[in-house]
């Protein structure tokens, strides 16, 4: 057995290569997840869908199974092979993304989005755990920030590729292209990323009920989870509906909208993700509370800047104002995902991450996109074509709630932190 473990370990890629492959898969995760946003206008026009229906496709259709299946798939990954769970998940969500391009009506594309959610349910939490296995505690928040670059990079690639292909062919071709591309990288991922052998002295895998009970007894878990969920309601809502706002209220076409969103995500998002992880690792050595305080401060500063970008009538001013709050919107990723992994022993990391993601995504992703779309529909009699703009402005209150919850989570983390085994 010892010889077998050594052989497996010798074939494993370096931590940096593993992280690069996980990042590549996460990029495709968000390309497939966010491409619907840039394609919303042509889809609505061809299939005759209103904002509330598009909100369901962007949020609820994806989030229902993505959030709930993430927990059993993460538990399976903790007890079997994390790399295999990620690989099969990649194949599944890529296949269903391609199927979206064949939809002939609302319920057809709703079902395909359910399939995308099923696939992506097994991707993120096991990836968090793989990173936890390969990077020490004092470097983990920054490593998770590198992985989280998949969000701005994938979102930007999704809107750029989706907008480009849709403008030159149609929206159906855009789904087919990105879906097939994901299928091609699955074999490469499995060939490179191996499960890290667990030491013979490591503790046996915890039962699901034990992990859930441990987290349920820690206020830090609930504060981090609901704080992230509040911010994600606004974050996912803005990410999905901003392309529509730019076309309705600023008069941009599909390609111009793609460049606007792509540049904001790449410039602002990349800086914010990396800065959040670096700050948390540096400040968190002295006080674990900074894993909550760093995101709290970012949310507070982001609110007036987002409001200015949404309210202005100038495309140039909007672009400049969105850059900084877009960075601040991503600051939480490294600190919070790292802190959640430190609430449990190493053998329960994927399960703990999945329980956090269950709350964050079911509320944030499932509710945010639909809520902004439904609010826009409700405000249309009052504000007409500017209803979506006012819907976004009202929703900024969610960031203030998130800031309060993260600020309270800081002191709670001091007591809840689980030390790394020697």
Image (spheres, helix red, strand yellow):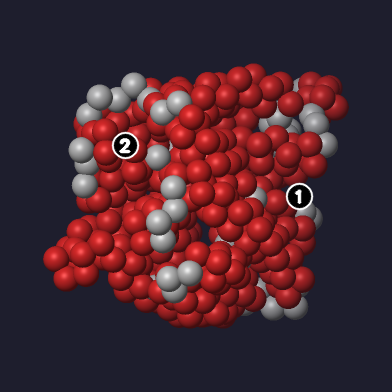
Depth check: give the residue in front, 122 or 216.
Answer: 122
Does residue 206 sit above or below 144 in this rendering? above
Question: What secondary structure is found at the residue carrying circle 2?
Answer: helix
Question: What secondary structure is found at the residue carrying circle 1?
Answer: loop
Q: Is residue 68 visible?
A: no
Residue 384 point in image, percent of width and height: 21, 64
Residue situated furthest left in the rendering: 381
Left or right, 176 with respect to 126, comes to left
Depth check: give the residue in front, 84 or 179.
Answer: 179
Image quarter in which the N terminus is found:
top right
Q: Answer few, some or many: residues within 10 Å of disc 1's Cα (few below 14, many 20 plus, some between 14 and 19).
A: some
Q: Residue at x 56, y 26 (%)?
A: 182
Identify the residue position indicated by label 1 in the image: 135
Q: Residue at x 54, y 71 (%)?
A: 317
Residue 68 point in image, percent of width and height: 36, 43
Q: Quadrant of residue 368?
A: bottom left
Does residue 308 sit above or below 361 in this rendering? below
Left or right, 367 with respect to 275, comes to left
Depth check: give the residue in front, 207 or 289.
Answer: 289
Image quarter in which the C terminus is found:
bottom right
Q: Is residue 54 visible?
A: yes
Q: Residue at x 44, y 48 (%)?
A: 253
Residue 43's tag is 2
Residue 115 point in image, percent of width and height: 37, 30
The answer for how far apart the CA atoms under marks 1 and 2 are is 43 Å
Left or right, 392 with respect to 332, comes to left
Q: Residue at x 45, y 44 (%)?
A: 254
Residue 268 point in image, percent of width and height: 63, 62
Of the two numbered discs 1 and 2 on the same chain, state the one appearing first in sequence. 2
């Amino acid at each position: 057995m010892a010889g077998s473990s050594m052989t497996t370990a010798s074939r494993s890629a370096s931590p940096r290569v593993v992280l690069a492959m996980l990042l590549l898969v996460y990029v495709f995760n968000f390309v497939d997840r966010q491409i619907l946003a840039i394609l919303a206008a042509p889809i609505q026009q061809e299939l005759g869908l209103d904002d509330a229906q598009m909100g369901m496709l962007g949020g609820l259709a994806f989030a229902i199974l993505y959030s709930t299946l993430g927990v059993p798939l993460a538990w399976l990954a903790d007890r079997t092979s994390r790399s295999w769970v990620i690989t099969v998940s990649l194949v599944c969500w890529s296949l269903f993304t391609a199927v979206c391009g064949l939809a002939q009506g609302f319920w057809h594309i709703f079902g395909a989005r359910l399939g995308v959610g099923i696939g992506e349910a097994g991707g993120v939490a096991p990836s968090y755990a793989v990173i936890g296995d390969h990077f020490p505690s004092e470097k983990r928040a920054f490593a998770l920030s590198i992985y989280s670059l998949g969000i701005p990079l994938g979102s930007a690639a999704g809107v750029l590729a989706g907008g480009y292909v849709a403008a030159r062919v149609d929206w159906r071709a855009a789904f087919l292209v990105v879906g097939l591309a994901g299928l091609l990288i699955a074999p490469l991922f499995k060939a490179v990323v191996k499960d890290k052998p667990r030491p013979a002295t490591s503790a046996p895998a915890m039962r699901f009920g034990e992990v859930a009970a441990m987290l349920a007894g820690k206020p830090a878990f609930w504060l981090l989870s609901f704080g992230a969920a509040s911010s994600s309601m606004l974050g996912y809502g803005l990410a999905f509906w901003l392309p529509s706002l730019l076309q309705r209220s600023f008069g941009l076409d599909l390609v111009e909208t793609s460049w606007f969103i792509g540049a904001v995500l790449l410039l602002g998002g990349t800086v914010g993700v990396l800065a959040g992880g670096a700050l948390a690792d540096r400040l968190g050595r002295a006080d674990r509370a900074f894993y909550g305080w760093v995101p709290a401060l970012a949310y507070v500063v982001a609110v007036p800047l987002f409001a200015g970008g949404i309210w202005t009538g100038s495309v140039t001013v909007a672009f400049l104002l969105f850059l900084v709050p877009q960075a601040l919107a991503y600051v939480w990723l490294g600190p919070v995902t790292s802190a959640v992994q430190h609430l449990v022993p190493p053998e329960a990391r994927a399960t703990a991450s999945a329980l956090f993601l269950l709350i964050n995504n079911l509320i944030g992703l499932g509710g945010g996109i639909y809520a902004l779309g439904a609010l826009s529909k409700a405000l249309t009699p009052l504000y007409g074509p500017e209803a979506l703009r006012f819907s976004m402005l009202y929703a900024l209150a969610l960031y203030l709630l998130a800031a309060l919850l993260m600020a309270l989570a800081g002191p709670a983390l001091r007591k809840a932190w689980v030390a790394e085994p020697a």
